[in-house]
Image (cartoon, grey):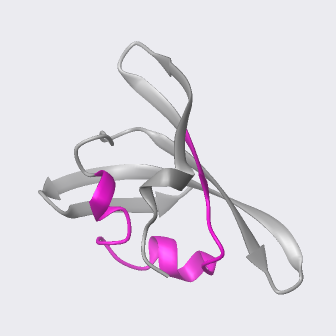
Amino acid sequence: MPFNSRELSVLAYANGFTLWHYRTSDQAAELDGGVCYFAGADELLREGDQIIVNLQEGNRPALVNLVVTAIEQPGRVCVARV
């Protein structure tokens, strides 16, 4: 499933850092496997921001913590697990 901007929300903001929350039914590998999943939020996200992702792994709820490592160009958001 593609990125859904309605599921991305700010949890905290201070000193140029934003902690985000995102909810999806996608698998964890789809989120951090490439640079285009969060492309729809490239104007909101900044390098160093963190994203807490709620998702399903099998029949169980799971969390994945991501950090934005780079915004390479419009539409290319790089993230990595922390």
Query: Which residue is pictured at 49% across the width and 20% down the height?
Result: 13
Query: Which residue is pictured at 40% across the width and 60% down the height?
Result: 79
Q: Quadrant of residue 56?
A: bottom right
Of residue 43 and residue 34, the one placed in the foreground of this image is 43
Q: Is residue 3 in the magenta section?
A: no
Of residue 48 and residue 37, the one placed in the foreground of this image is 37
Query: Which residue is pictured at 49% across the width and 72% down the height?
Result: 31
**Extreme-right residue of the structure:** 60
Range of magenta residues: 20-41
Q: Is residue 60 left or right of residue 38?
A: right
Q: Is residue 39 left or right of residue 7?
A: left
Q: Is residue 7 left or right of residue 33?
A: right
Query: Which residue is pictured at 28% across the width and 63% down the height?
Result: 39
Q: Is residue 40 left or right of residue 81?
A: left
Q: Is residue 31 in the magenta section?
A: yes
User: What x and y, as percent, mark residue 33?
Assistant: 43, 79
Q: Quadrant of the C terminus?
A: bottom right
Up/down of 4 relative to 42, above or below? below
User: What x and y, as percent, mark residue 12?
Assistant: 57, 24
